[in-house]
Image (cartoon, rainbow, N blue to C red):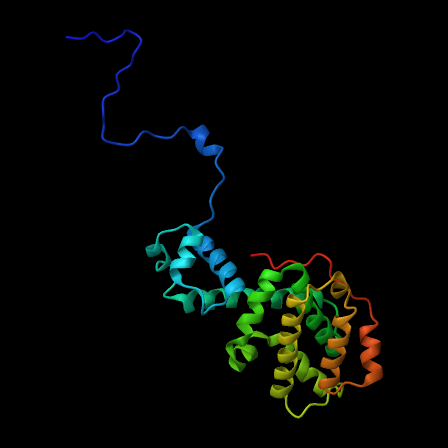
Amino acid sequence: MSKIAKNVVVVPHTGQAPTEPKSAKAGRPRRKPVRQRLFDAALALFSTQGVEATTIDQIVEAADVAKGSFYNYFQDRNGIMAAIAAELRGLLEQGIARLNEGIDDPAERMARGFRLYLALAVLEPGRASMLARLYEGGDKLIMKSNPGLLRDLKVGVEKGLLNVPSIEAAQHLVMGLALISMRHLLSHSAGEEILRGEGYARDITTLMMQGVGMDTQYISEVLDRPFSITQLTLAT
């Protein structure tokens, strides 16, 4: 019979994997929850290659999770797209609300919200691209996602600041112009003048305000008021 060395401790086999020391766990970066990893992966893929070109397999691979985990949180690709759309629209609406705190003039509120949307092309191009793609979902999505704009249009008409044939047409004009302007800025490397509402941002905002029937002199007055967005984020 062989002898066991005195200094060797024999540990009986239990059939369980050895427990990792707490010190090793403490030094390891904590991973995001599975749902958030799926959300982030889908957002990145949708932003770069579009919703239709993205598969669930690509999402779970990018998120580094098992495919079955996807269905614990989302029914299908449209389900995760809807979740992303709802969150981004909500965050944008919150950002516009913060930007317009203390401002009662509906014309100025519209101009500031419009320029904030354009500023995303500079500060958060990934999410800006995703927002631009989401707004391709049709007029129902547009009408549902911009309660602040709808309210300002109605108040502007009531106060005689706007002259439009219908609120619905005005909302479509504003969002359609915002969408194509965003795409232009994303494809032409928008500069920091956009954050100050200058250059193209002022030109296209002027056109938007003319489109909803604002007086030319009043447009200039509104756009000459202080405006600057230098540290905007749509944090989740």
Up-down: is 9 above or below 38?
above
Task: From the top left corner, tell me how far across and down residue 160 is, in percent.
Answer: 75, 88
Up-down: is 49 above or below 216?
above
In-image side of 172 versus 12 (left or right): right
Task: From the top left corner, tell me how far across and down residue 58 is, in percent.
Answer: 41, 58
Quarter the N terminus occupies: top left
Q: Residue at x 23, y 21 (%)?
A: 12
Residue found at the far left of this picture = 1
Q: Is residue 143 visible?
A: yes
In-image side of 56 versus 191 (left or right): left
Work out whether residue 103 or residue 162 is closer to the camera in this orientation and state it: 162
In-image side of 44 versus 226 (left or right): left
Asked where in the image residue 156 lies, by quadrant, the reply is bottom right
Q: Residue at x 85, y 83 (%)?
A: 217
Up-down: is 184 above or below 208?
above
Asked where in the image residue 131 lies, by quadrant, the reply is bottom right
Q: Residue at x 69, y 83 (%)?
A: 155
Task: From the top left corner, tell me how far across and down residue 224 is, in percent.
Answer: 84, 72
Work out whether residue 183 or residue 12 is closer to the camera in this orientation and state it: 183
Residue found at the far front of this picture = 188
In-image side of 82 versus 172 (left or right): left
Q: Is residue 105 visible?
A: no
Up-down: is 171 above or below 40?
below
Q: Could you tell me how many numbered marks the image carries?
A: 0
Quarter the C terminus occupies: bottom right
